[in-house]
Amino acid sequence: MTVGYLPNTATWGNASHEPPRDGLVATSDPVYLRVVEDIRRQITDGTLPPGAPIPSRAQLTRKYQVGETAARHALRVLASEGLIIGRVGSGHYVRERPDLTPLHRWRFLDHPASFAADLQSQGRRVTWDWHSEPVEAGPTIARRLRLPESSALTRTRYVYRGDGKPLQLATSFEPREFAPHSDDERRSLVARLYAHGIKVTEVVESVHSRVPRPAESDALQLAAGVHVLHIERTHWAGDRPVETSDIVIPGDRFRVTYSMPL
Amino acid sequence: MTVGYLPNTATWGNASHEPPRDGLVATSDPVYLRVVEDIRRQITDGTLPPGAPIPSRAQLTRKYQVGETAARHALRVLASEGLIIGRVGSGHYVRERPDLTPLHRWRFLDHPASFAADLQSQGRRVTWDWHSEPVEAGPTIARRLRLPESSALTRTRYVYRGDGKPLQLATSFEPREFAPHSDDERRSLVARLYAHGIKVTEVVESVHSRVPRPAESDALQLAAGVHVLHIERTHWAGDRPVETSDIVIPGDRFRVTYSMPL
DNA sequence: ATCGCAAAGTTGGGGCTCCAACGCTCATCG
DNA sequence: CGATGAGCGTTGGAGCCCCAACTTTGCGAT
């Protein structure tokens, strides 16, 4: 069935065909954008509340008089924007966006796991495990710790979980001579360094957003399209960096807050 | 790891064609993912440096023995991740990612435009303009300022530009009676409030990452797939919030840094 | 040696179709 | 009355094709 190809009515110039027909024209060039914009508007202005079903591909083609490709493309764009989420066999729905749990970075500053402490203070059960191993600094970390690239460091990787689900990854780098040897020593970085005659005076954090690396996406069980917040934290003793770590958290579930007294 | 799925023998029977042929098979479920993962790996490990050309659709179909749809889909995914960028008529290229300019949020705390001050201290020319208008608080801002929803506020929208290009959007909300009436008053929020007998004691910032709203994407001239960093900043006088603003910056060009003394 | 132009290649918008895995609903059977 | 299963609808992967707008390249003419 379906022999030869039909003319394929106007891919580009559908000038003469129909009068505007749909409310305000807008005539925005790509057809799928008309669909995207219309649905996006309905989501942001609340016409379609979280959980509401989005018309299916078939329905969209009818409603907006577009081909299946366009309908499909529109849905994919909205999904990659995180506005809707598709469930196979069921349909697309307006994404319930979990409200962003605040992480109060300035409290619990010297705590074995400030992250866990903060969440626990919010009544969540947080567990974590870690793994330490000796490494060489390498270019990036060497620059951050102002050490030669071949410096002997201890790298500790942490995985934090809330009620089983992974919430945060952290990787800490510190000169090997400072590394903790017991669980007790691990408790406080500041106390540990103090025992070596080093007084930590300042903690600097640098926050940026990026696409998760595949391993992170995997470890944090991230949905497609969600970014991560990457916090580079460095402990300083005067003008000397003594420890640095990379903290990675799902961008769709957390916000980090900082308080600065005047 | 490795969640693993089912066999998935070629959907539309070209089953018998050729033997695996390509290095380690991996057989990861969707075909397009094989392409995505391979290219992503090459980009992240530096095999494909920034600016390097990505094989075209046609070349990908040959190289990976996939259909055009899959090749296309792979490229779209990589583009929406911000790893590559497509130029019509030319090809796809590994995205040059501008290194992240740090914004030192704790310096210049009470400056008319801490943002501009920071960048100017880095030797950039920053200009900005603003527009004020009276508004009602509305649910969100009312909560942030702990005021009734119908409170009379002044909203000021700022657009900051560096060498002409837009870099940051900011929207500030403050009770109408505190709003500046002259350029001079605008200079310092803290001084202005002090004139009303209010002593700002603390600035709290909450950082999260999200997809830009269309208007923001437009105003900041964002490429597809880049997120924004959204900073909610509130000035507090004791336990009373006196001003709050939303600061939006391109997530692919900036990082925000905070310093916390111990 | 340089200019101009045509051919070839590439992206991005669209179109159509097939199919597997899965969800939902409803009627039928025990 | 409750469980079960068939059928329909929906997503998502995949394939193929057409075309407009644009870049790049290489060739031939000046």
Image: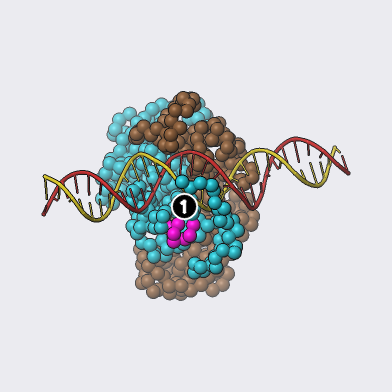
Chain colours: A cyan, B brown, C yellow, D red
Chief secondary structure of the magenta portion: helix
Crowd band around label 1 with a 10 angstrom C-alpha radius: few (<14), some (14–19), many (20+): some
Q: Quadrant of residue B24?
A: top left
- Residue at left offset 46%, top offset 46%: A1
| Residue A110 image point, x, y percent | 35, 43
Q: Chain of mark 1?
A: A
Q: Amino acid at mark 1?
A: Glu
**Is B209 above or below relative to B193?**
above
A63 in magenta: yes
Q: Would residue B247 be seen by someone viewing this image from the given angle?
A: no
**Relative horizontal placement of residue A118, taking residue B50 as reference (left or right):** left
| Residue B6 image point, x, y percent | 34, 34
The number of discs equals 1
Return the residue nearer the eye: A5 or A16. Answer: A5
| Residue B81 image point, x, y percent | 49, 44
Q: Would residue A179 be seen by someone viewing this image from the given angle?
A: yes
| Residue B36 image point, x, y percent | 48, 37
**Is B199 above or below relative to D27?**
below
Quarter of the C terminus of chain A within the rendering: bottom left
- Residue at left offset 51%, top offset 46%: A3
**Relative horizontal placement of residue A181, taking residue B246 as reference (left or right):** left
Q: Which residue is mark 1?
A: A68
Return the residue nearer the eye: A170 or A26. Answer: A26
Return the residue nearer the eye: A211 or A209. Answer: A211
- Residue at left offset 60%, top offset 62%: A15
B42 in magenta: no
Q: Quadrant of residue C9?
A: top right
- Residue at left offset 42%, top offset 68%: B198
**Is A193 above or below relative to B208?**
above
Residue bounds of the magenta highlight: A60-66
